[in-house]
Image (cartoon, coloured by chain):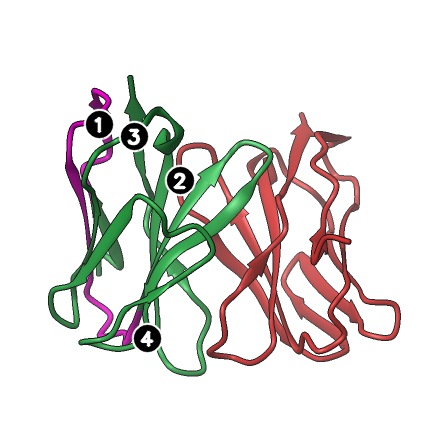
């Protein structure tokens, strides 16, 4: 049972490049989330999808887009990467009335 | 006033000691409280999940919630070097609401 799988694990981009971070869960969870984690800032919600076919903005959505491809997959896209988006990105999923389960993250550096 | 406050540490204690980790919060409407453990270069892993006030015990871990004081604690008994990690407190208004995370406390258990 893989849980929440994120790809890639590491990526280096140049400013202005685009990139899609992938997330897939095999637990049949309804809701999925994208967070970023920065030193001293904790985990901040970027976007979430309460169920297949819906997406909503979180605390820090600017510069990002998301796609809930199907029940299993939720991707995060940076259209024009900026150095301020250098961070560790975590995907999480949950079932109704249950807590969130996290993947192991994507470390993204933007030069 | 920040919604959730958590001392970042680091907290260093000798192996076998009792560890106390704490968070305070400002929103008295929070009802569900969580503790996540995060090892270096890994995603947060759910450790404890509690509802409202009271204590919950799981092996060497005890979670305590004092809603009157808006204060939650995680106690680790007989601490082990493998407990060295960052511990994140988290809370939410209801089971399916967005989670508010503390910034995490880094814990080092010294052999």
Quadrant location of residue A92?
bottom left
Q: Chain of mark 1?
A: A
Is B75 situated left or right of A79 in this image?
Answer: right
Residue tagged 4: A50
Dot 3 or dot 1: first in sequence order is: 1
Residue A94 in picture, x, y percent from top left: 36, 71
Residue A98 in picture, x, y percent from top left: 44, 77
Q: Are marks 1 and 2 in contact (CB under 8 Å)?
A: no
Q: CA distance from mark 3 to mark 1?
A: 5 Å
Foreground disc of the pair 4, 2 = 4
Mark 1 is surrounded, within 10 Å at the Cα level, by few (under 14), some (14 to 19) or many (20 or more) other residues, namely some
Residue tagged 1: A11
What hue represents chain A? green
Labelled disc at residue B42:
2
User: Please, what secondary structure does the residue beneath circle 3 have?
Assistant: strand
Q: CA distance from mark 4 to mark 2?
A: 24 Å
Dot 1 or dot 4: first in sequence order is: 1
Residue B53 lies in the magenta stretch: no
Labelled disc at residue A108:
3
What hue represents chain B? red
Residue B18 in picture, x, y percent from top left: 79, 46
Instruction: Residue at 54% x, 31% y: name it.
Output: A39
Q: Chain of mark 4?
A: A
Foreground disc of the pair 3, 2 = 3
Circles 1 and 2 on the same chain:
no
Foreground disc of the pair 1, 2 = 1
Instruction: Residue at 68% x, 68% y: name it.
Output: B57
Q: CA distance from mark 4 to mark 3?
A: 25 Å
Dot 4 or dot 3: first in sequence order is: 4
Front-lying residue, A32 or B21: A32
Height in image: A42 above or below A108? Answer: below
Front-lying residue, B38 or A44: A44
């Amino acid at each position: 049972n893989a849980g929440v799988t994120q790809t890639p694990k590491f990526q280096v981009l140049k400013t202005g490049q685009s990139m899609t971070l992938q997330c897939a869960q095999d637990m049949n969870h309804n809701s999925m989330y994208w967070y970023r984690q920065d030193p001293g800032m904790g985990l901040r919600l970027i976007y979430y999808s309460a169920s297949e076919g819906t997406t909503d903005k979180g605390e820090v959505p600017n510069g990002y887009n998301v796609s809930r491809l199907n029940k299993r997959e939720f991707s995060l896209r940076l259209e024009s990467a900026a150095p301020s988006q250098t961070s560790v990105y975590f995907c999480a999923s949950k079932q109704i009335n249950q807590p969130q389960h996290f993947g192991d993250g994507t470390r993204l550096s933007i030069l | 006033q920040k919604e959730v406050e958590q001392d970042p540490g680091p907290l260093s204690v000798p192996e076998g000691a009792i560890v106390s980790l704490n968070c305070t919060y400002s929103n008295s409407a929070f009802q569900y409280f969580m503790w996540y453990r995060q090892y270096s270069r890994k995603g947060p892993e759910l450790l404890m999940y509690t509802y409202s006030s009271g204590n919950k015990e799981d092996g060497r871990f005890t979670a305590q919630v004092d809603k009157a004081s808006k204060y939650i604690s995680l106690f680790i008994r007989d601490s082990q070097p493998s407990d060295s990690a960052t511990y994140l407190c988290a809370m939410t208004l209801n089971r399916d609401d967005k989670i508010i995370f503390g910034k995490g406390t880094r814990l080092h258990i010294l052999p």
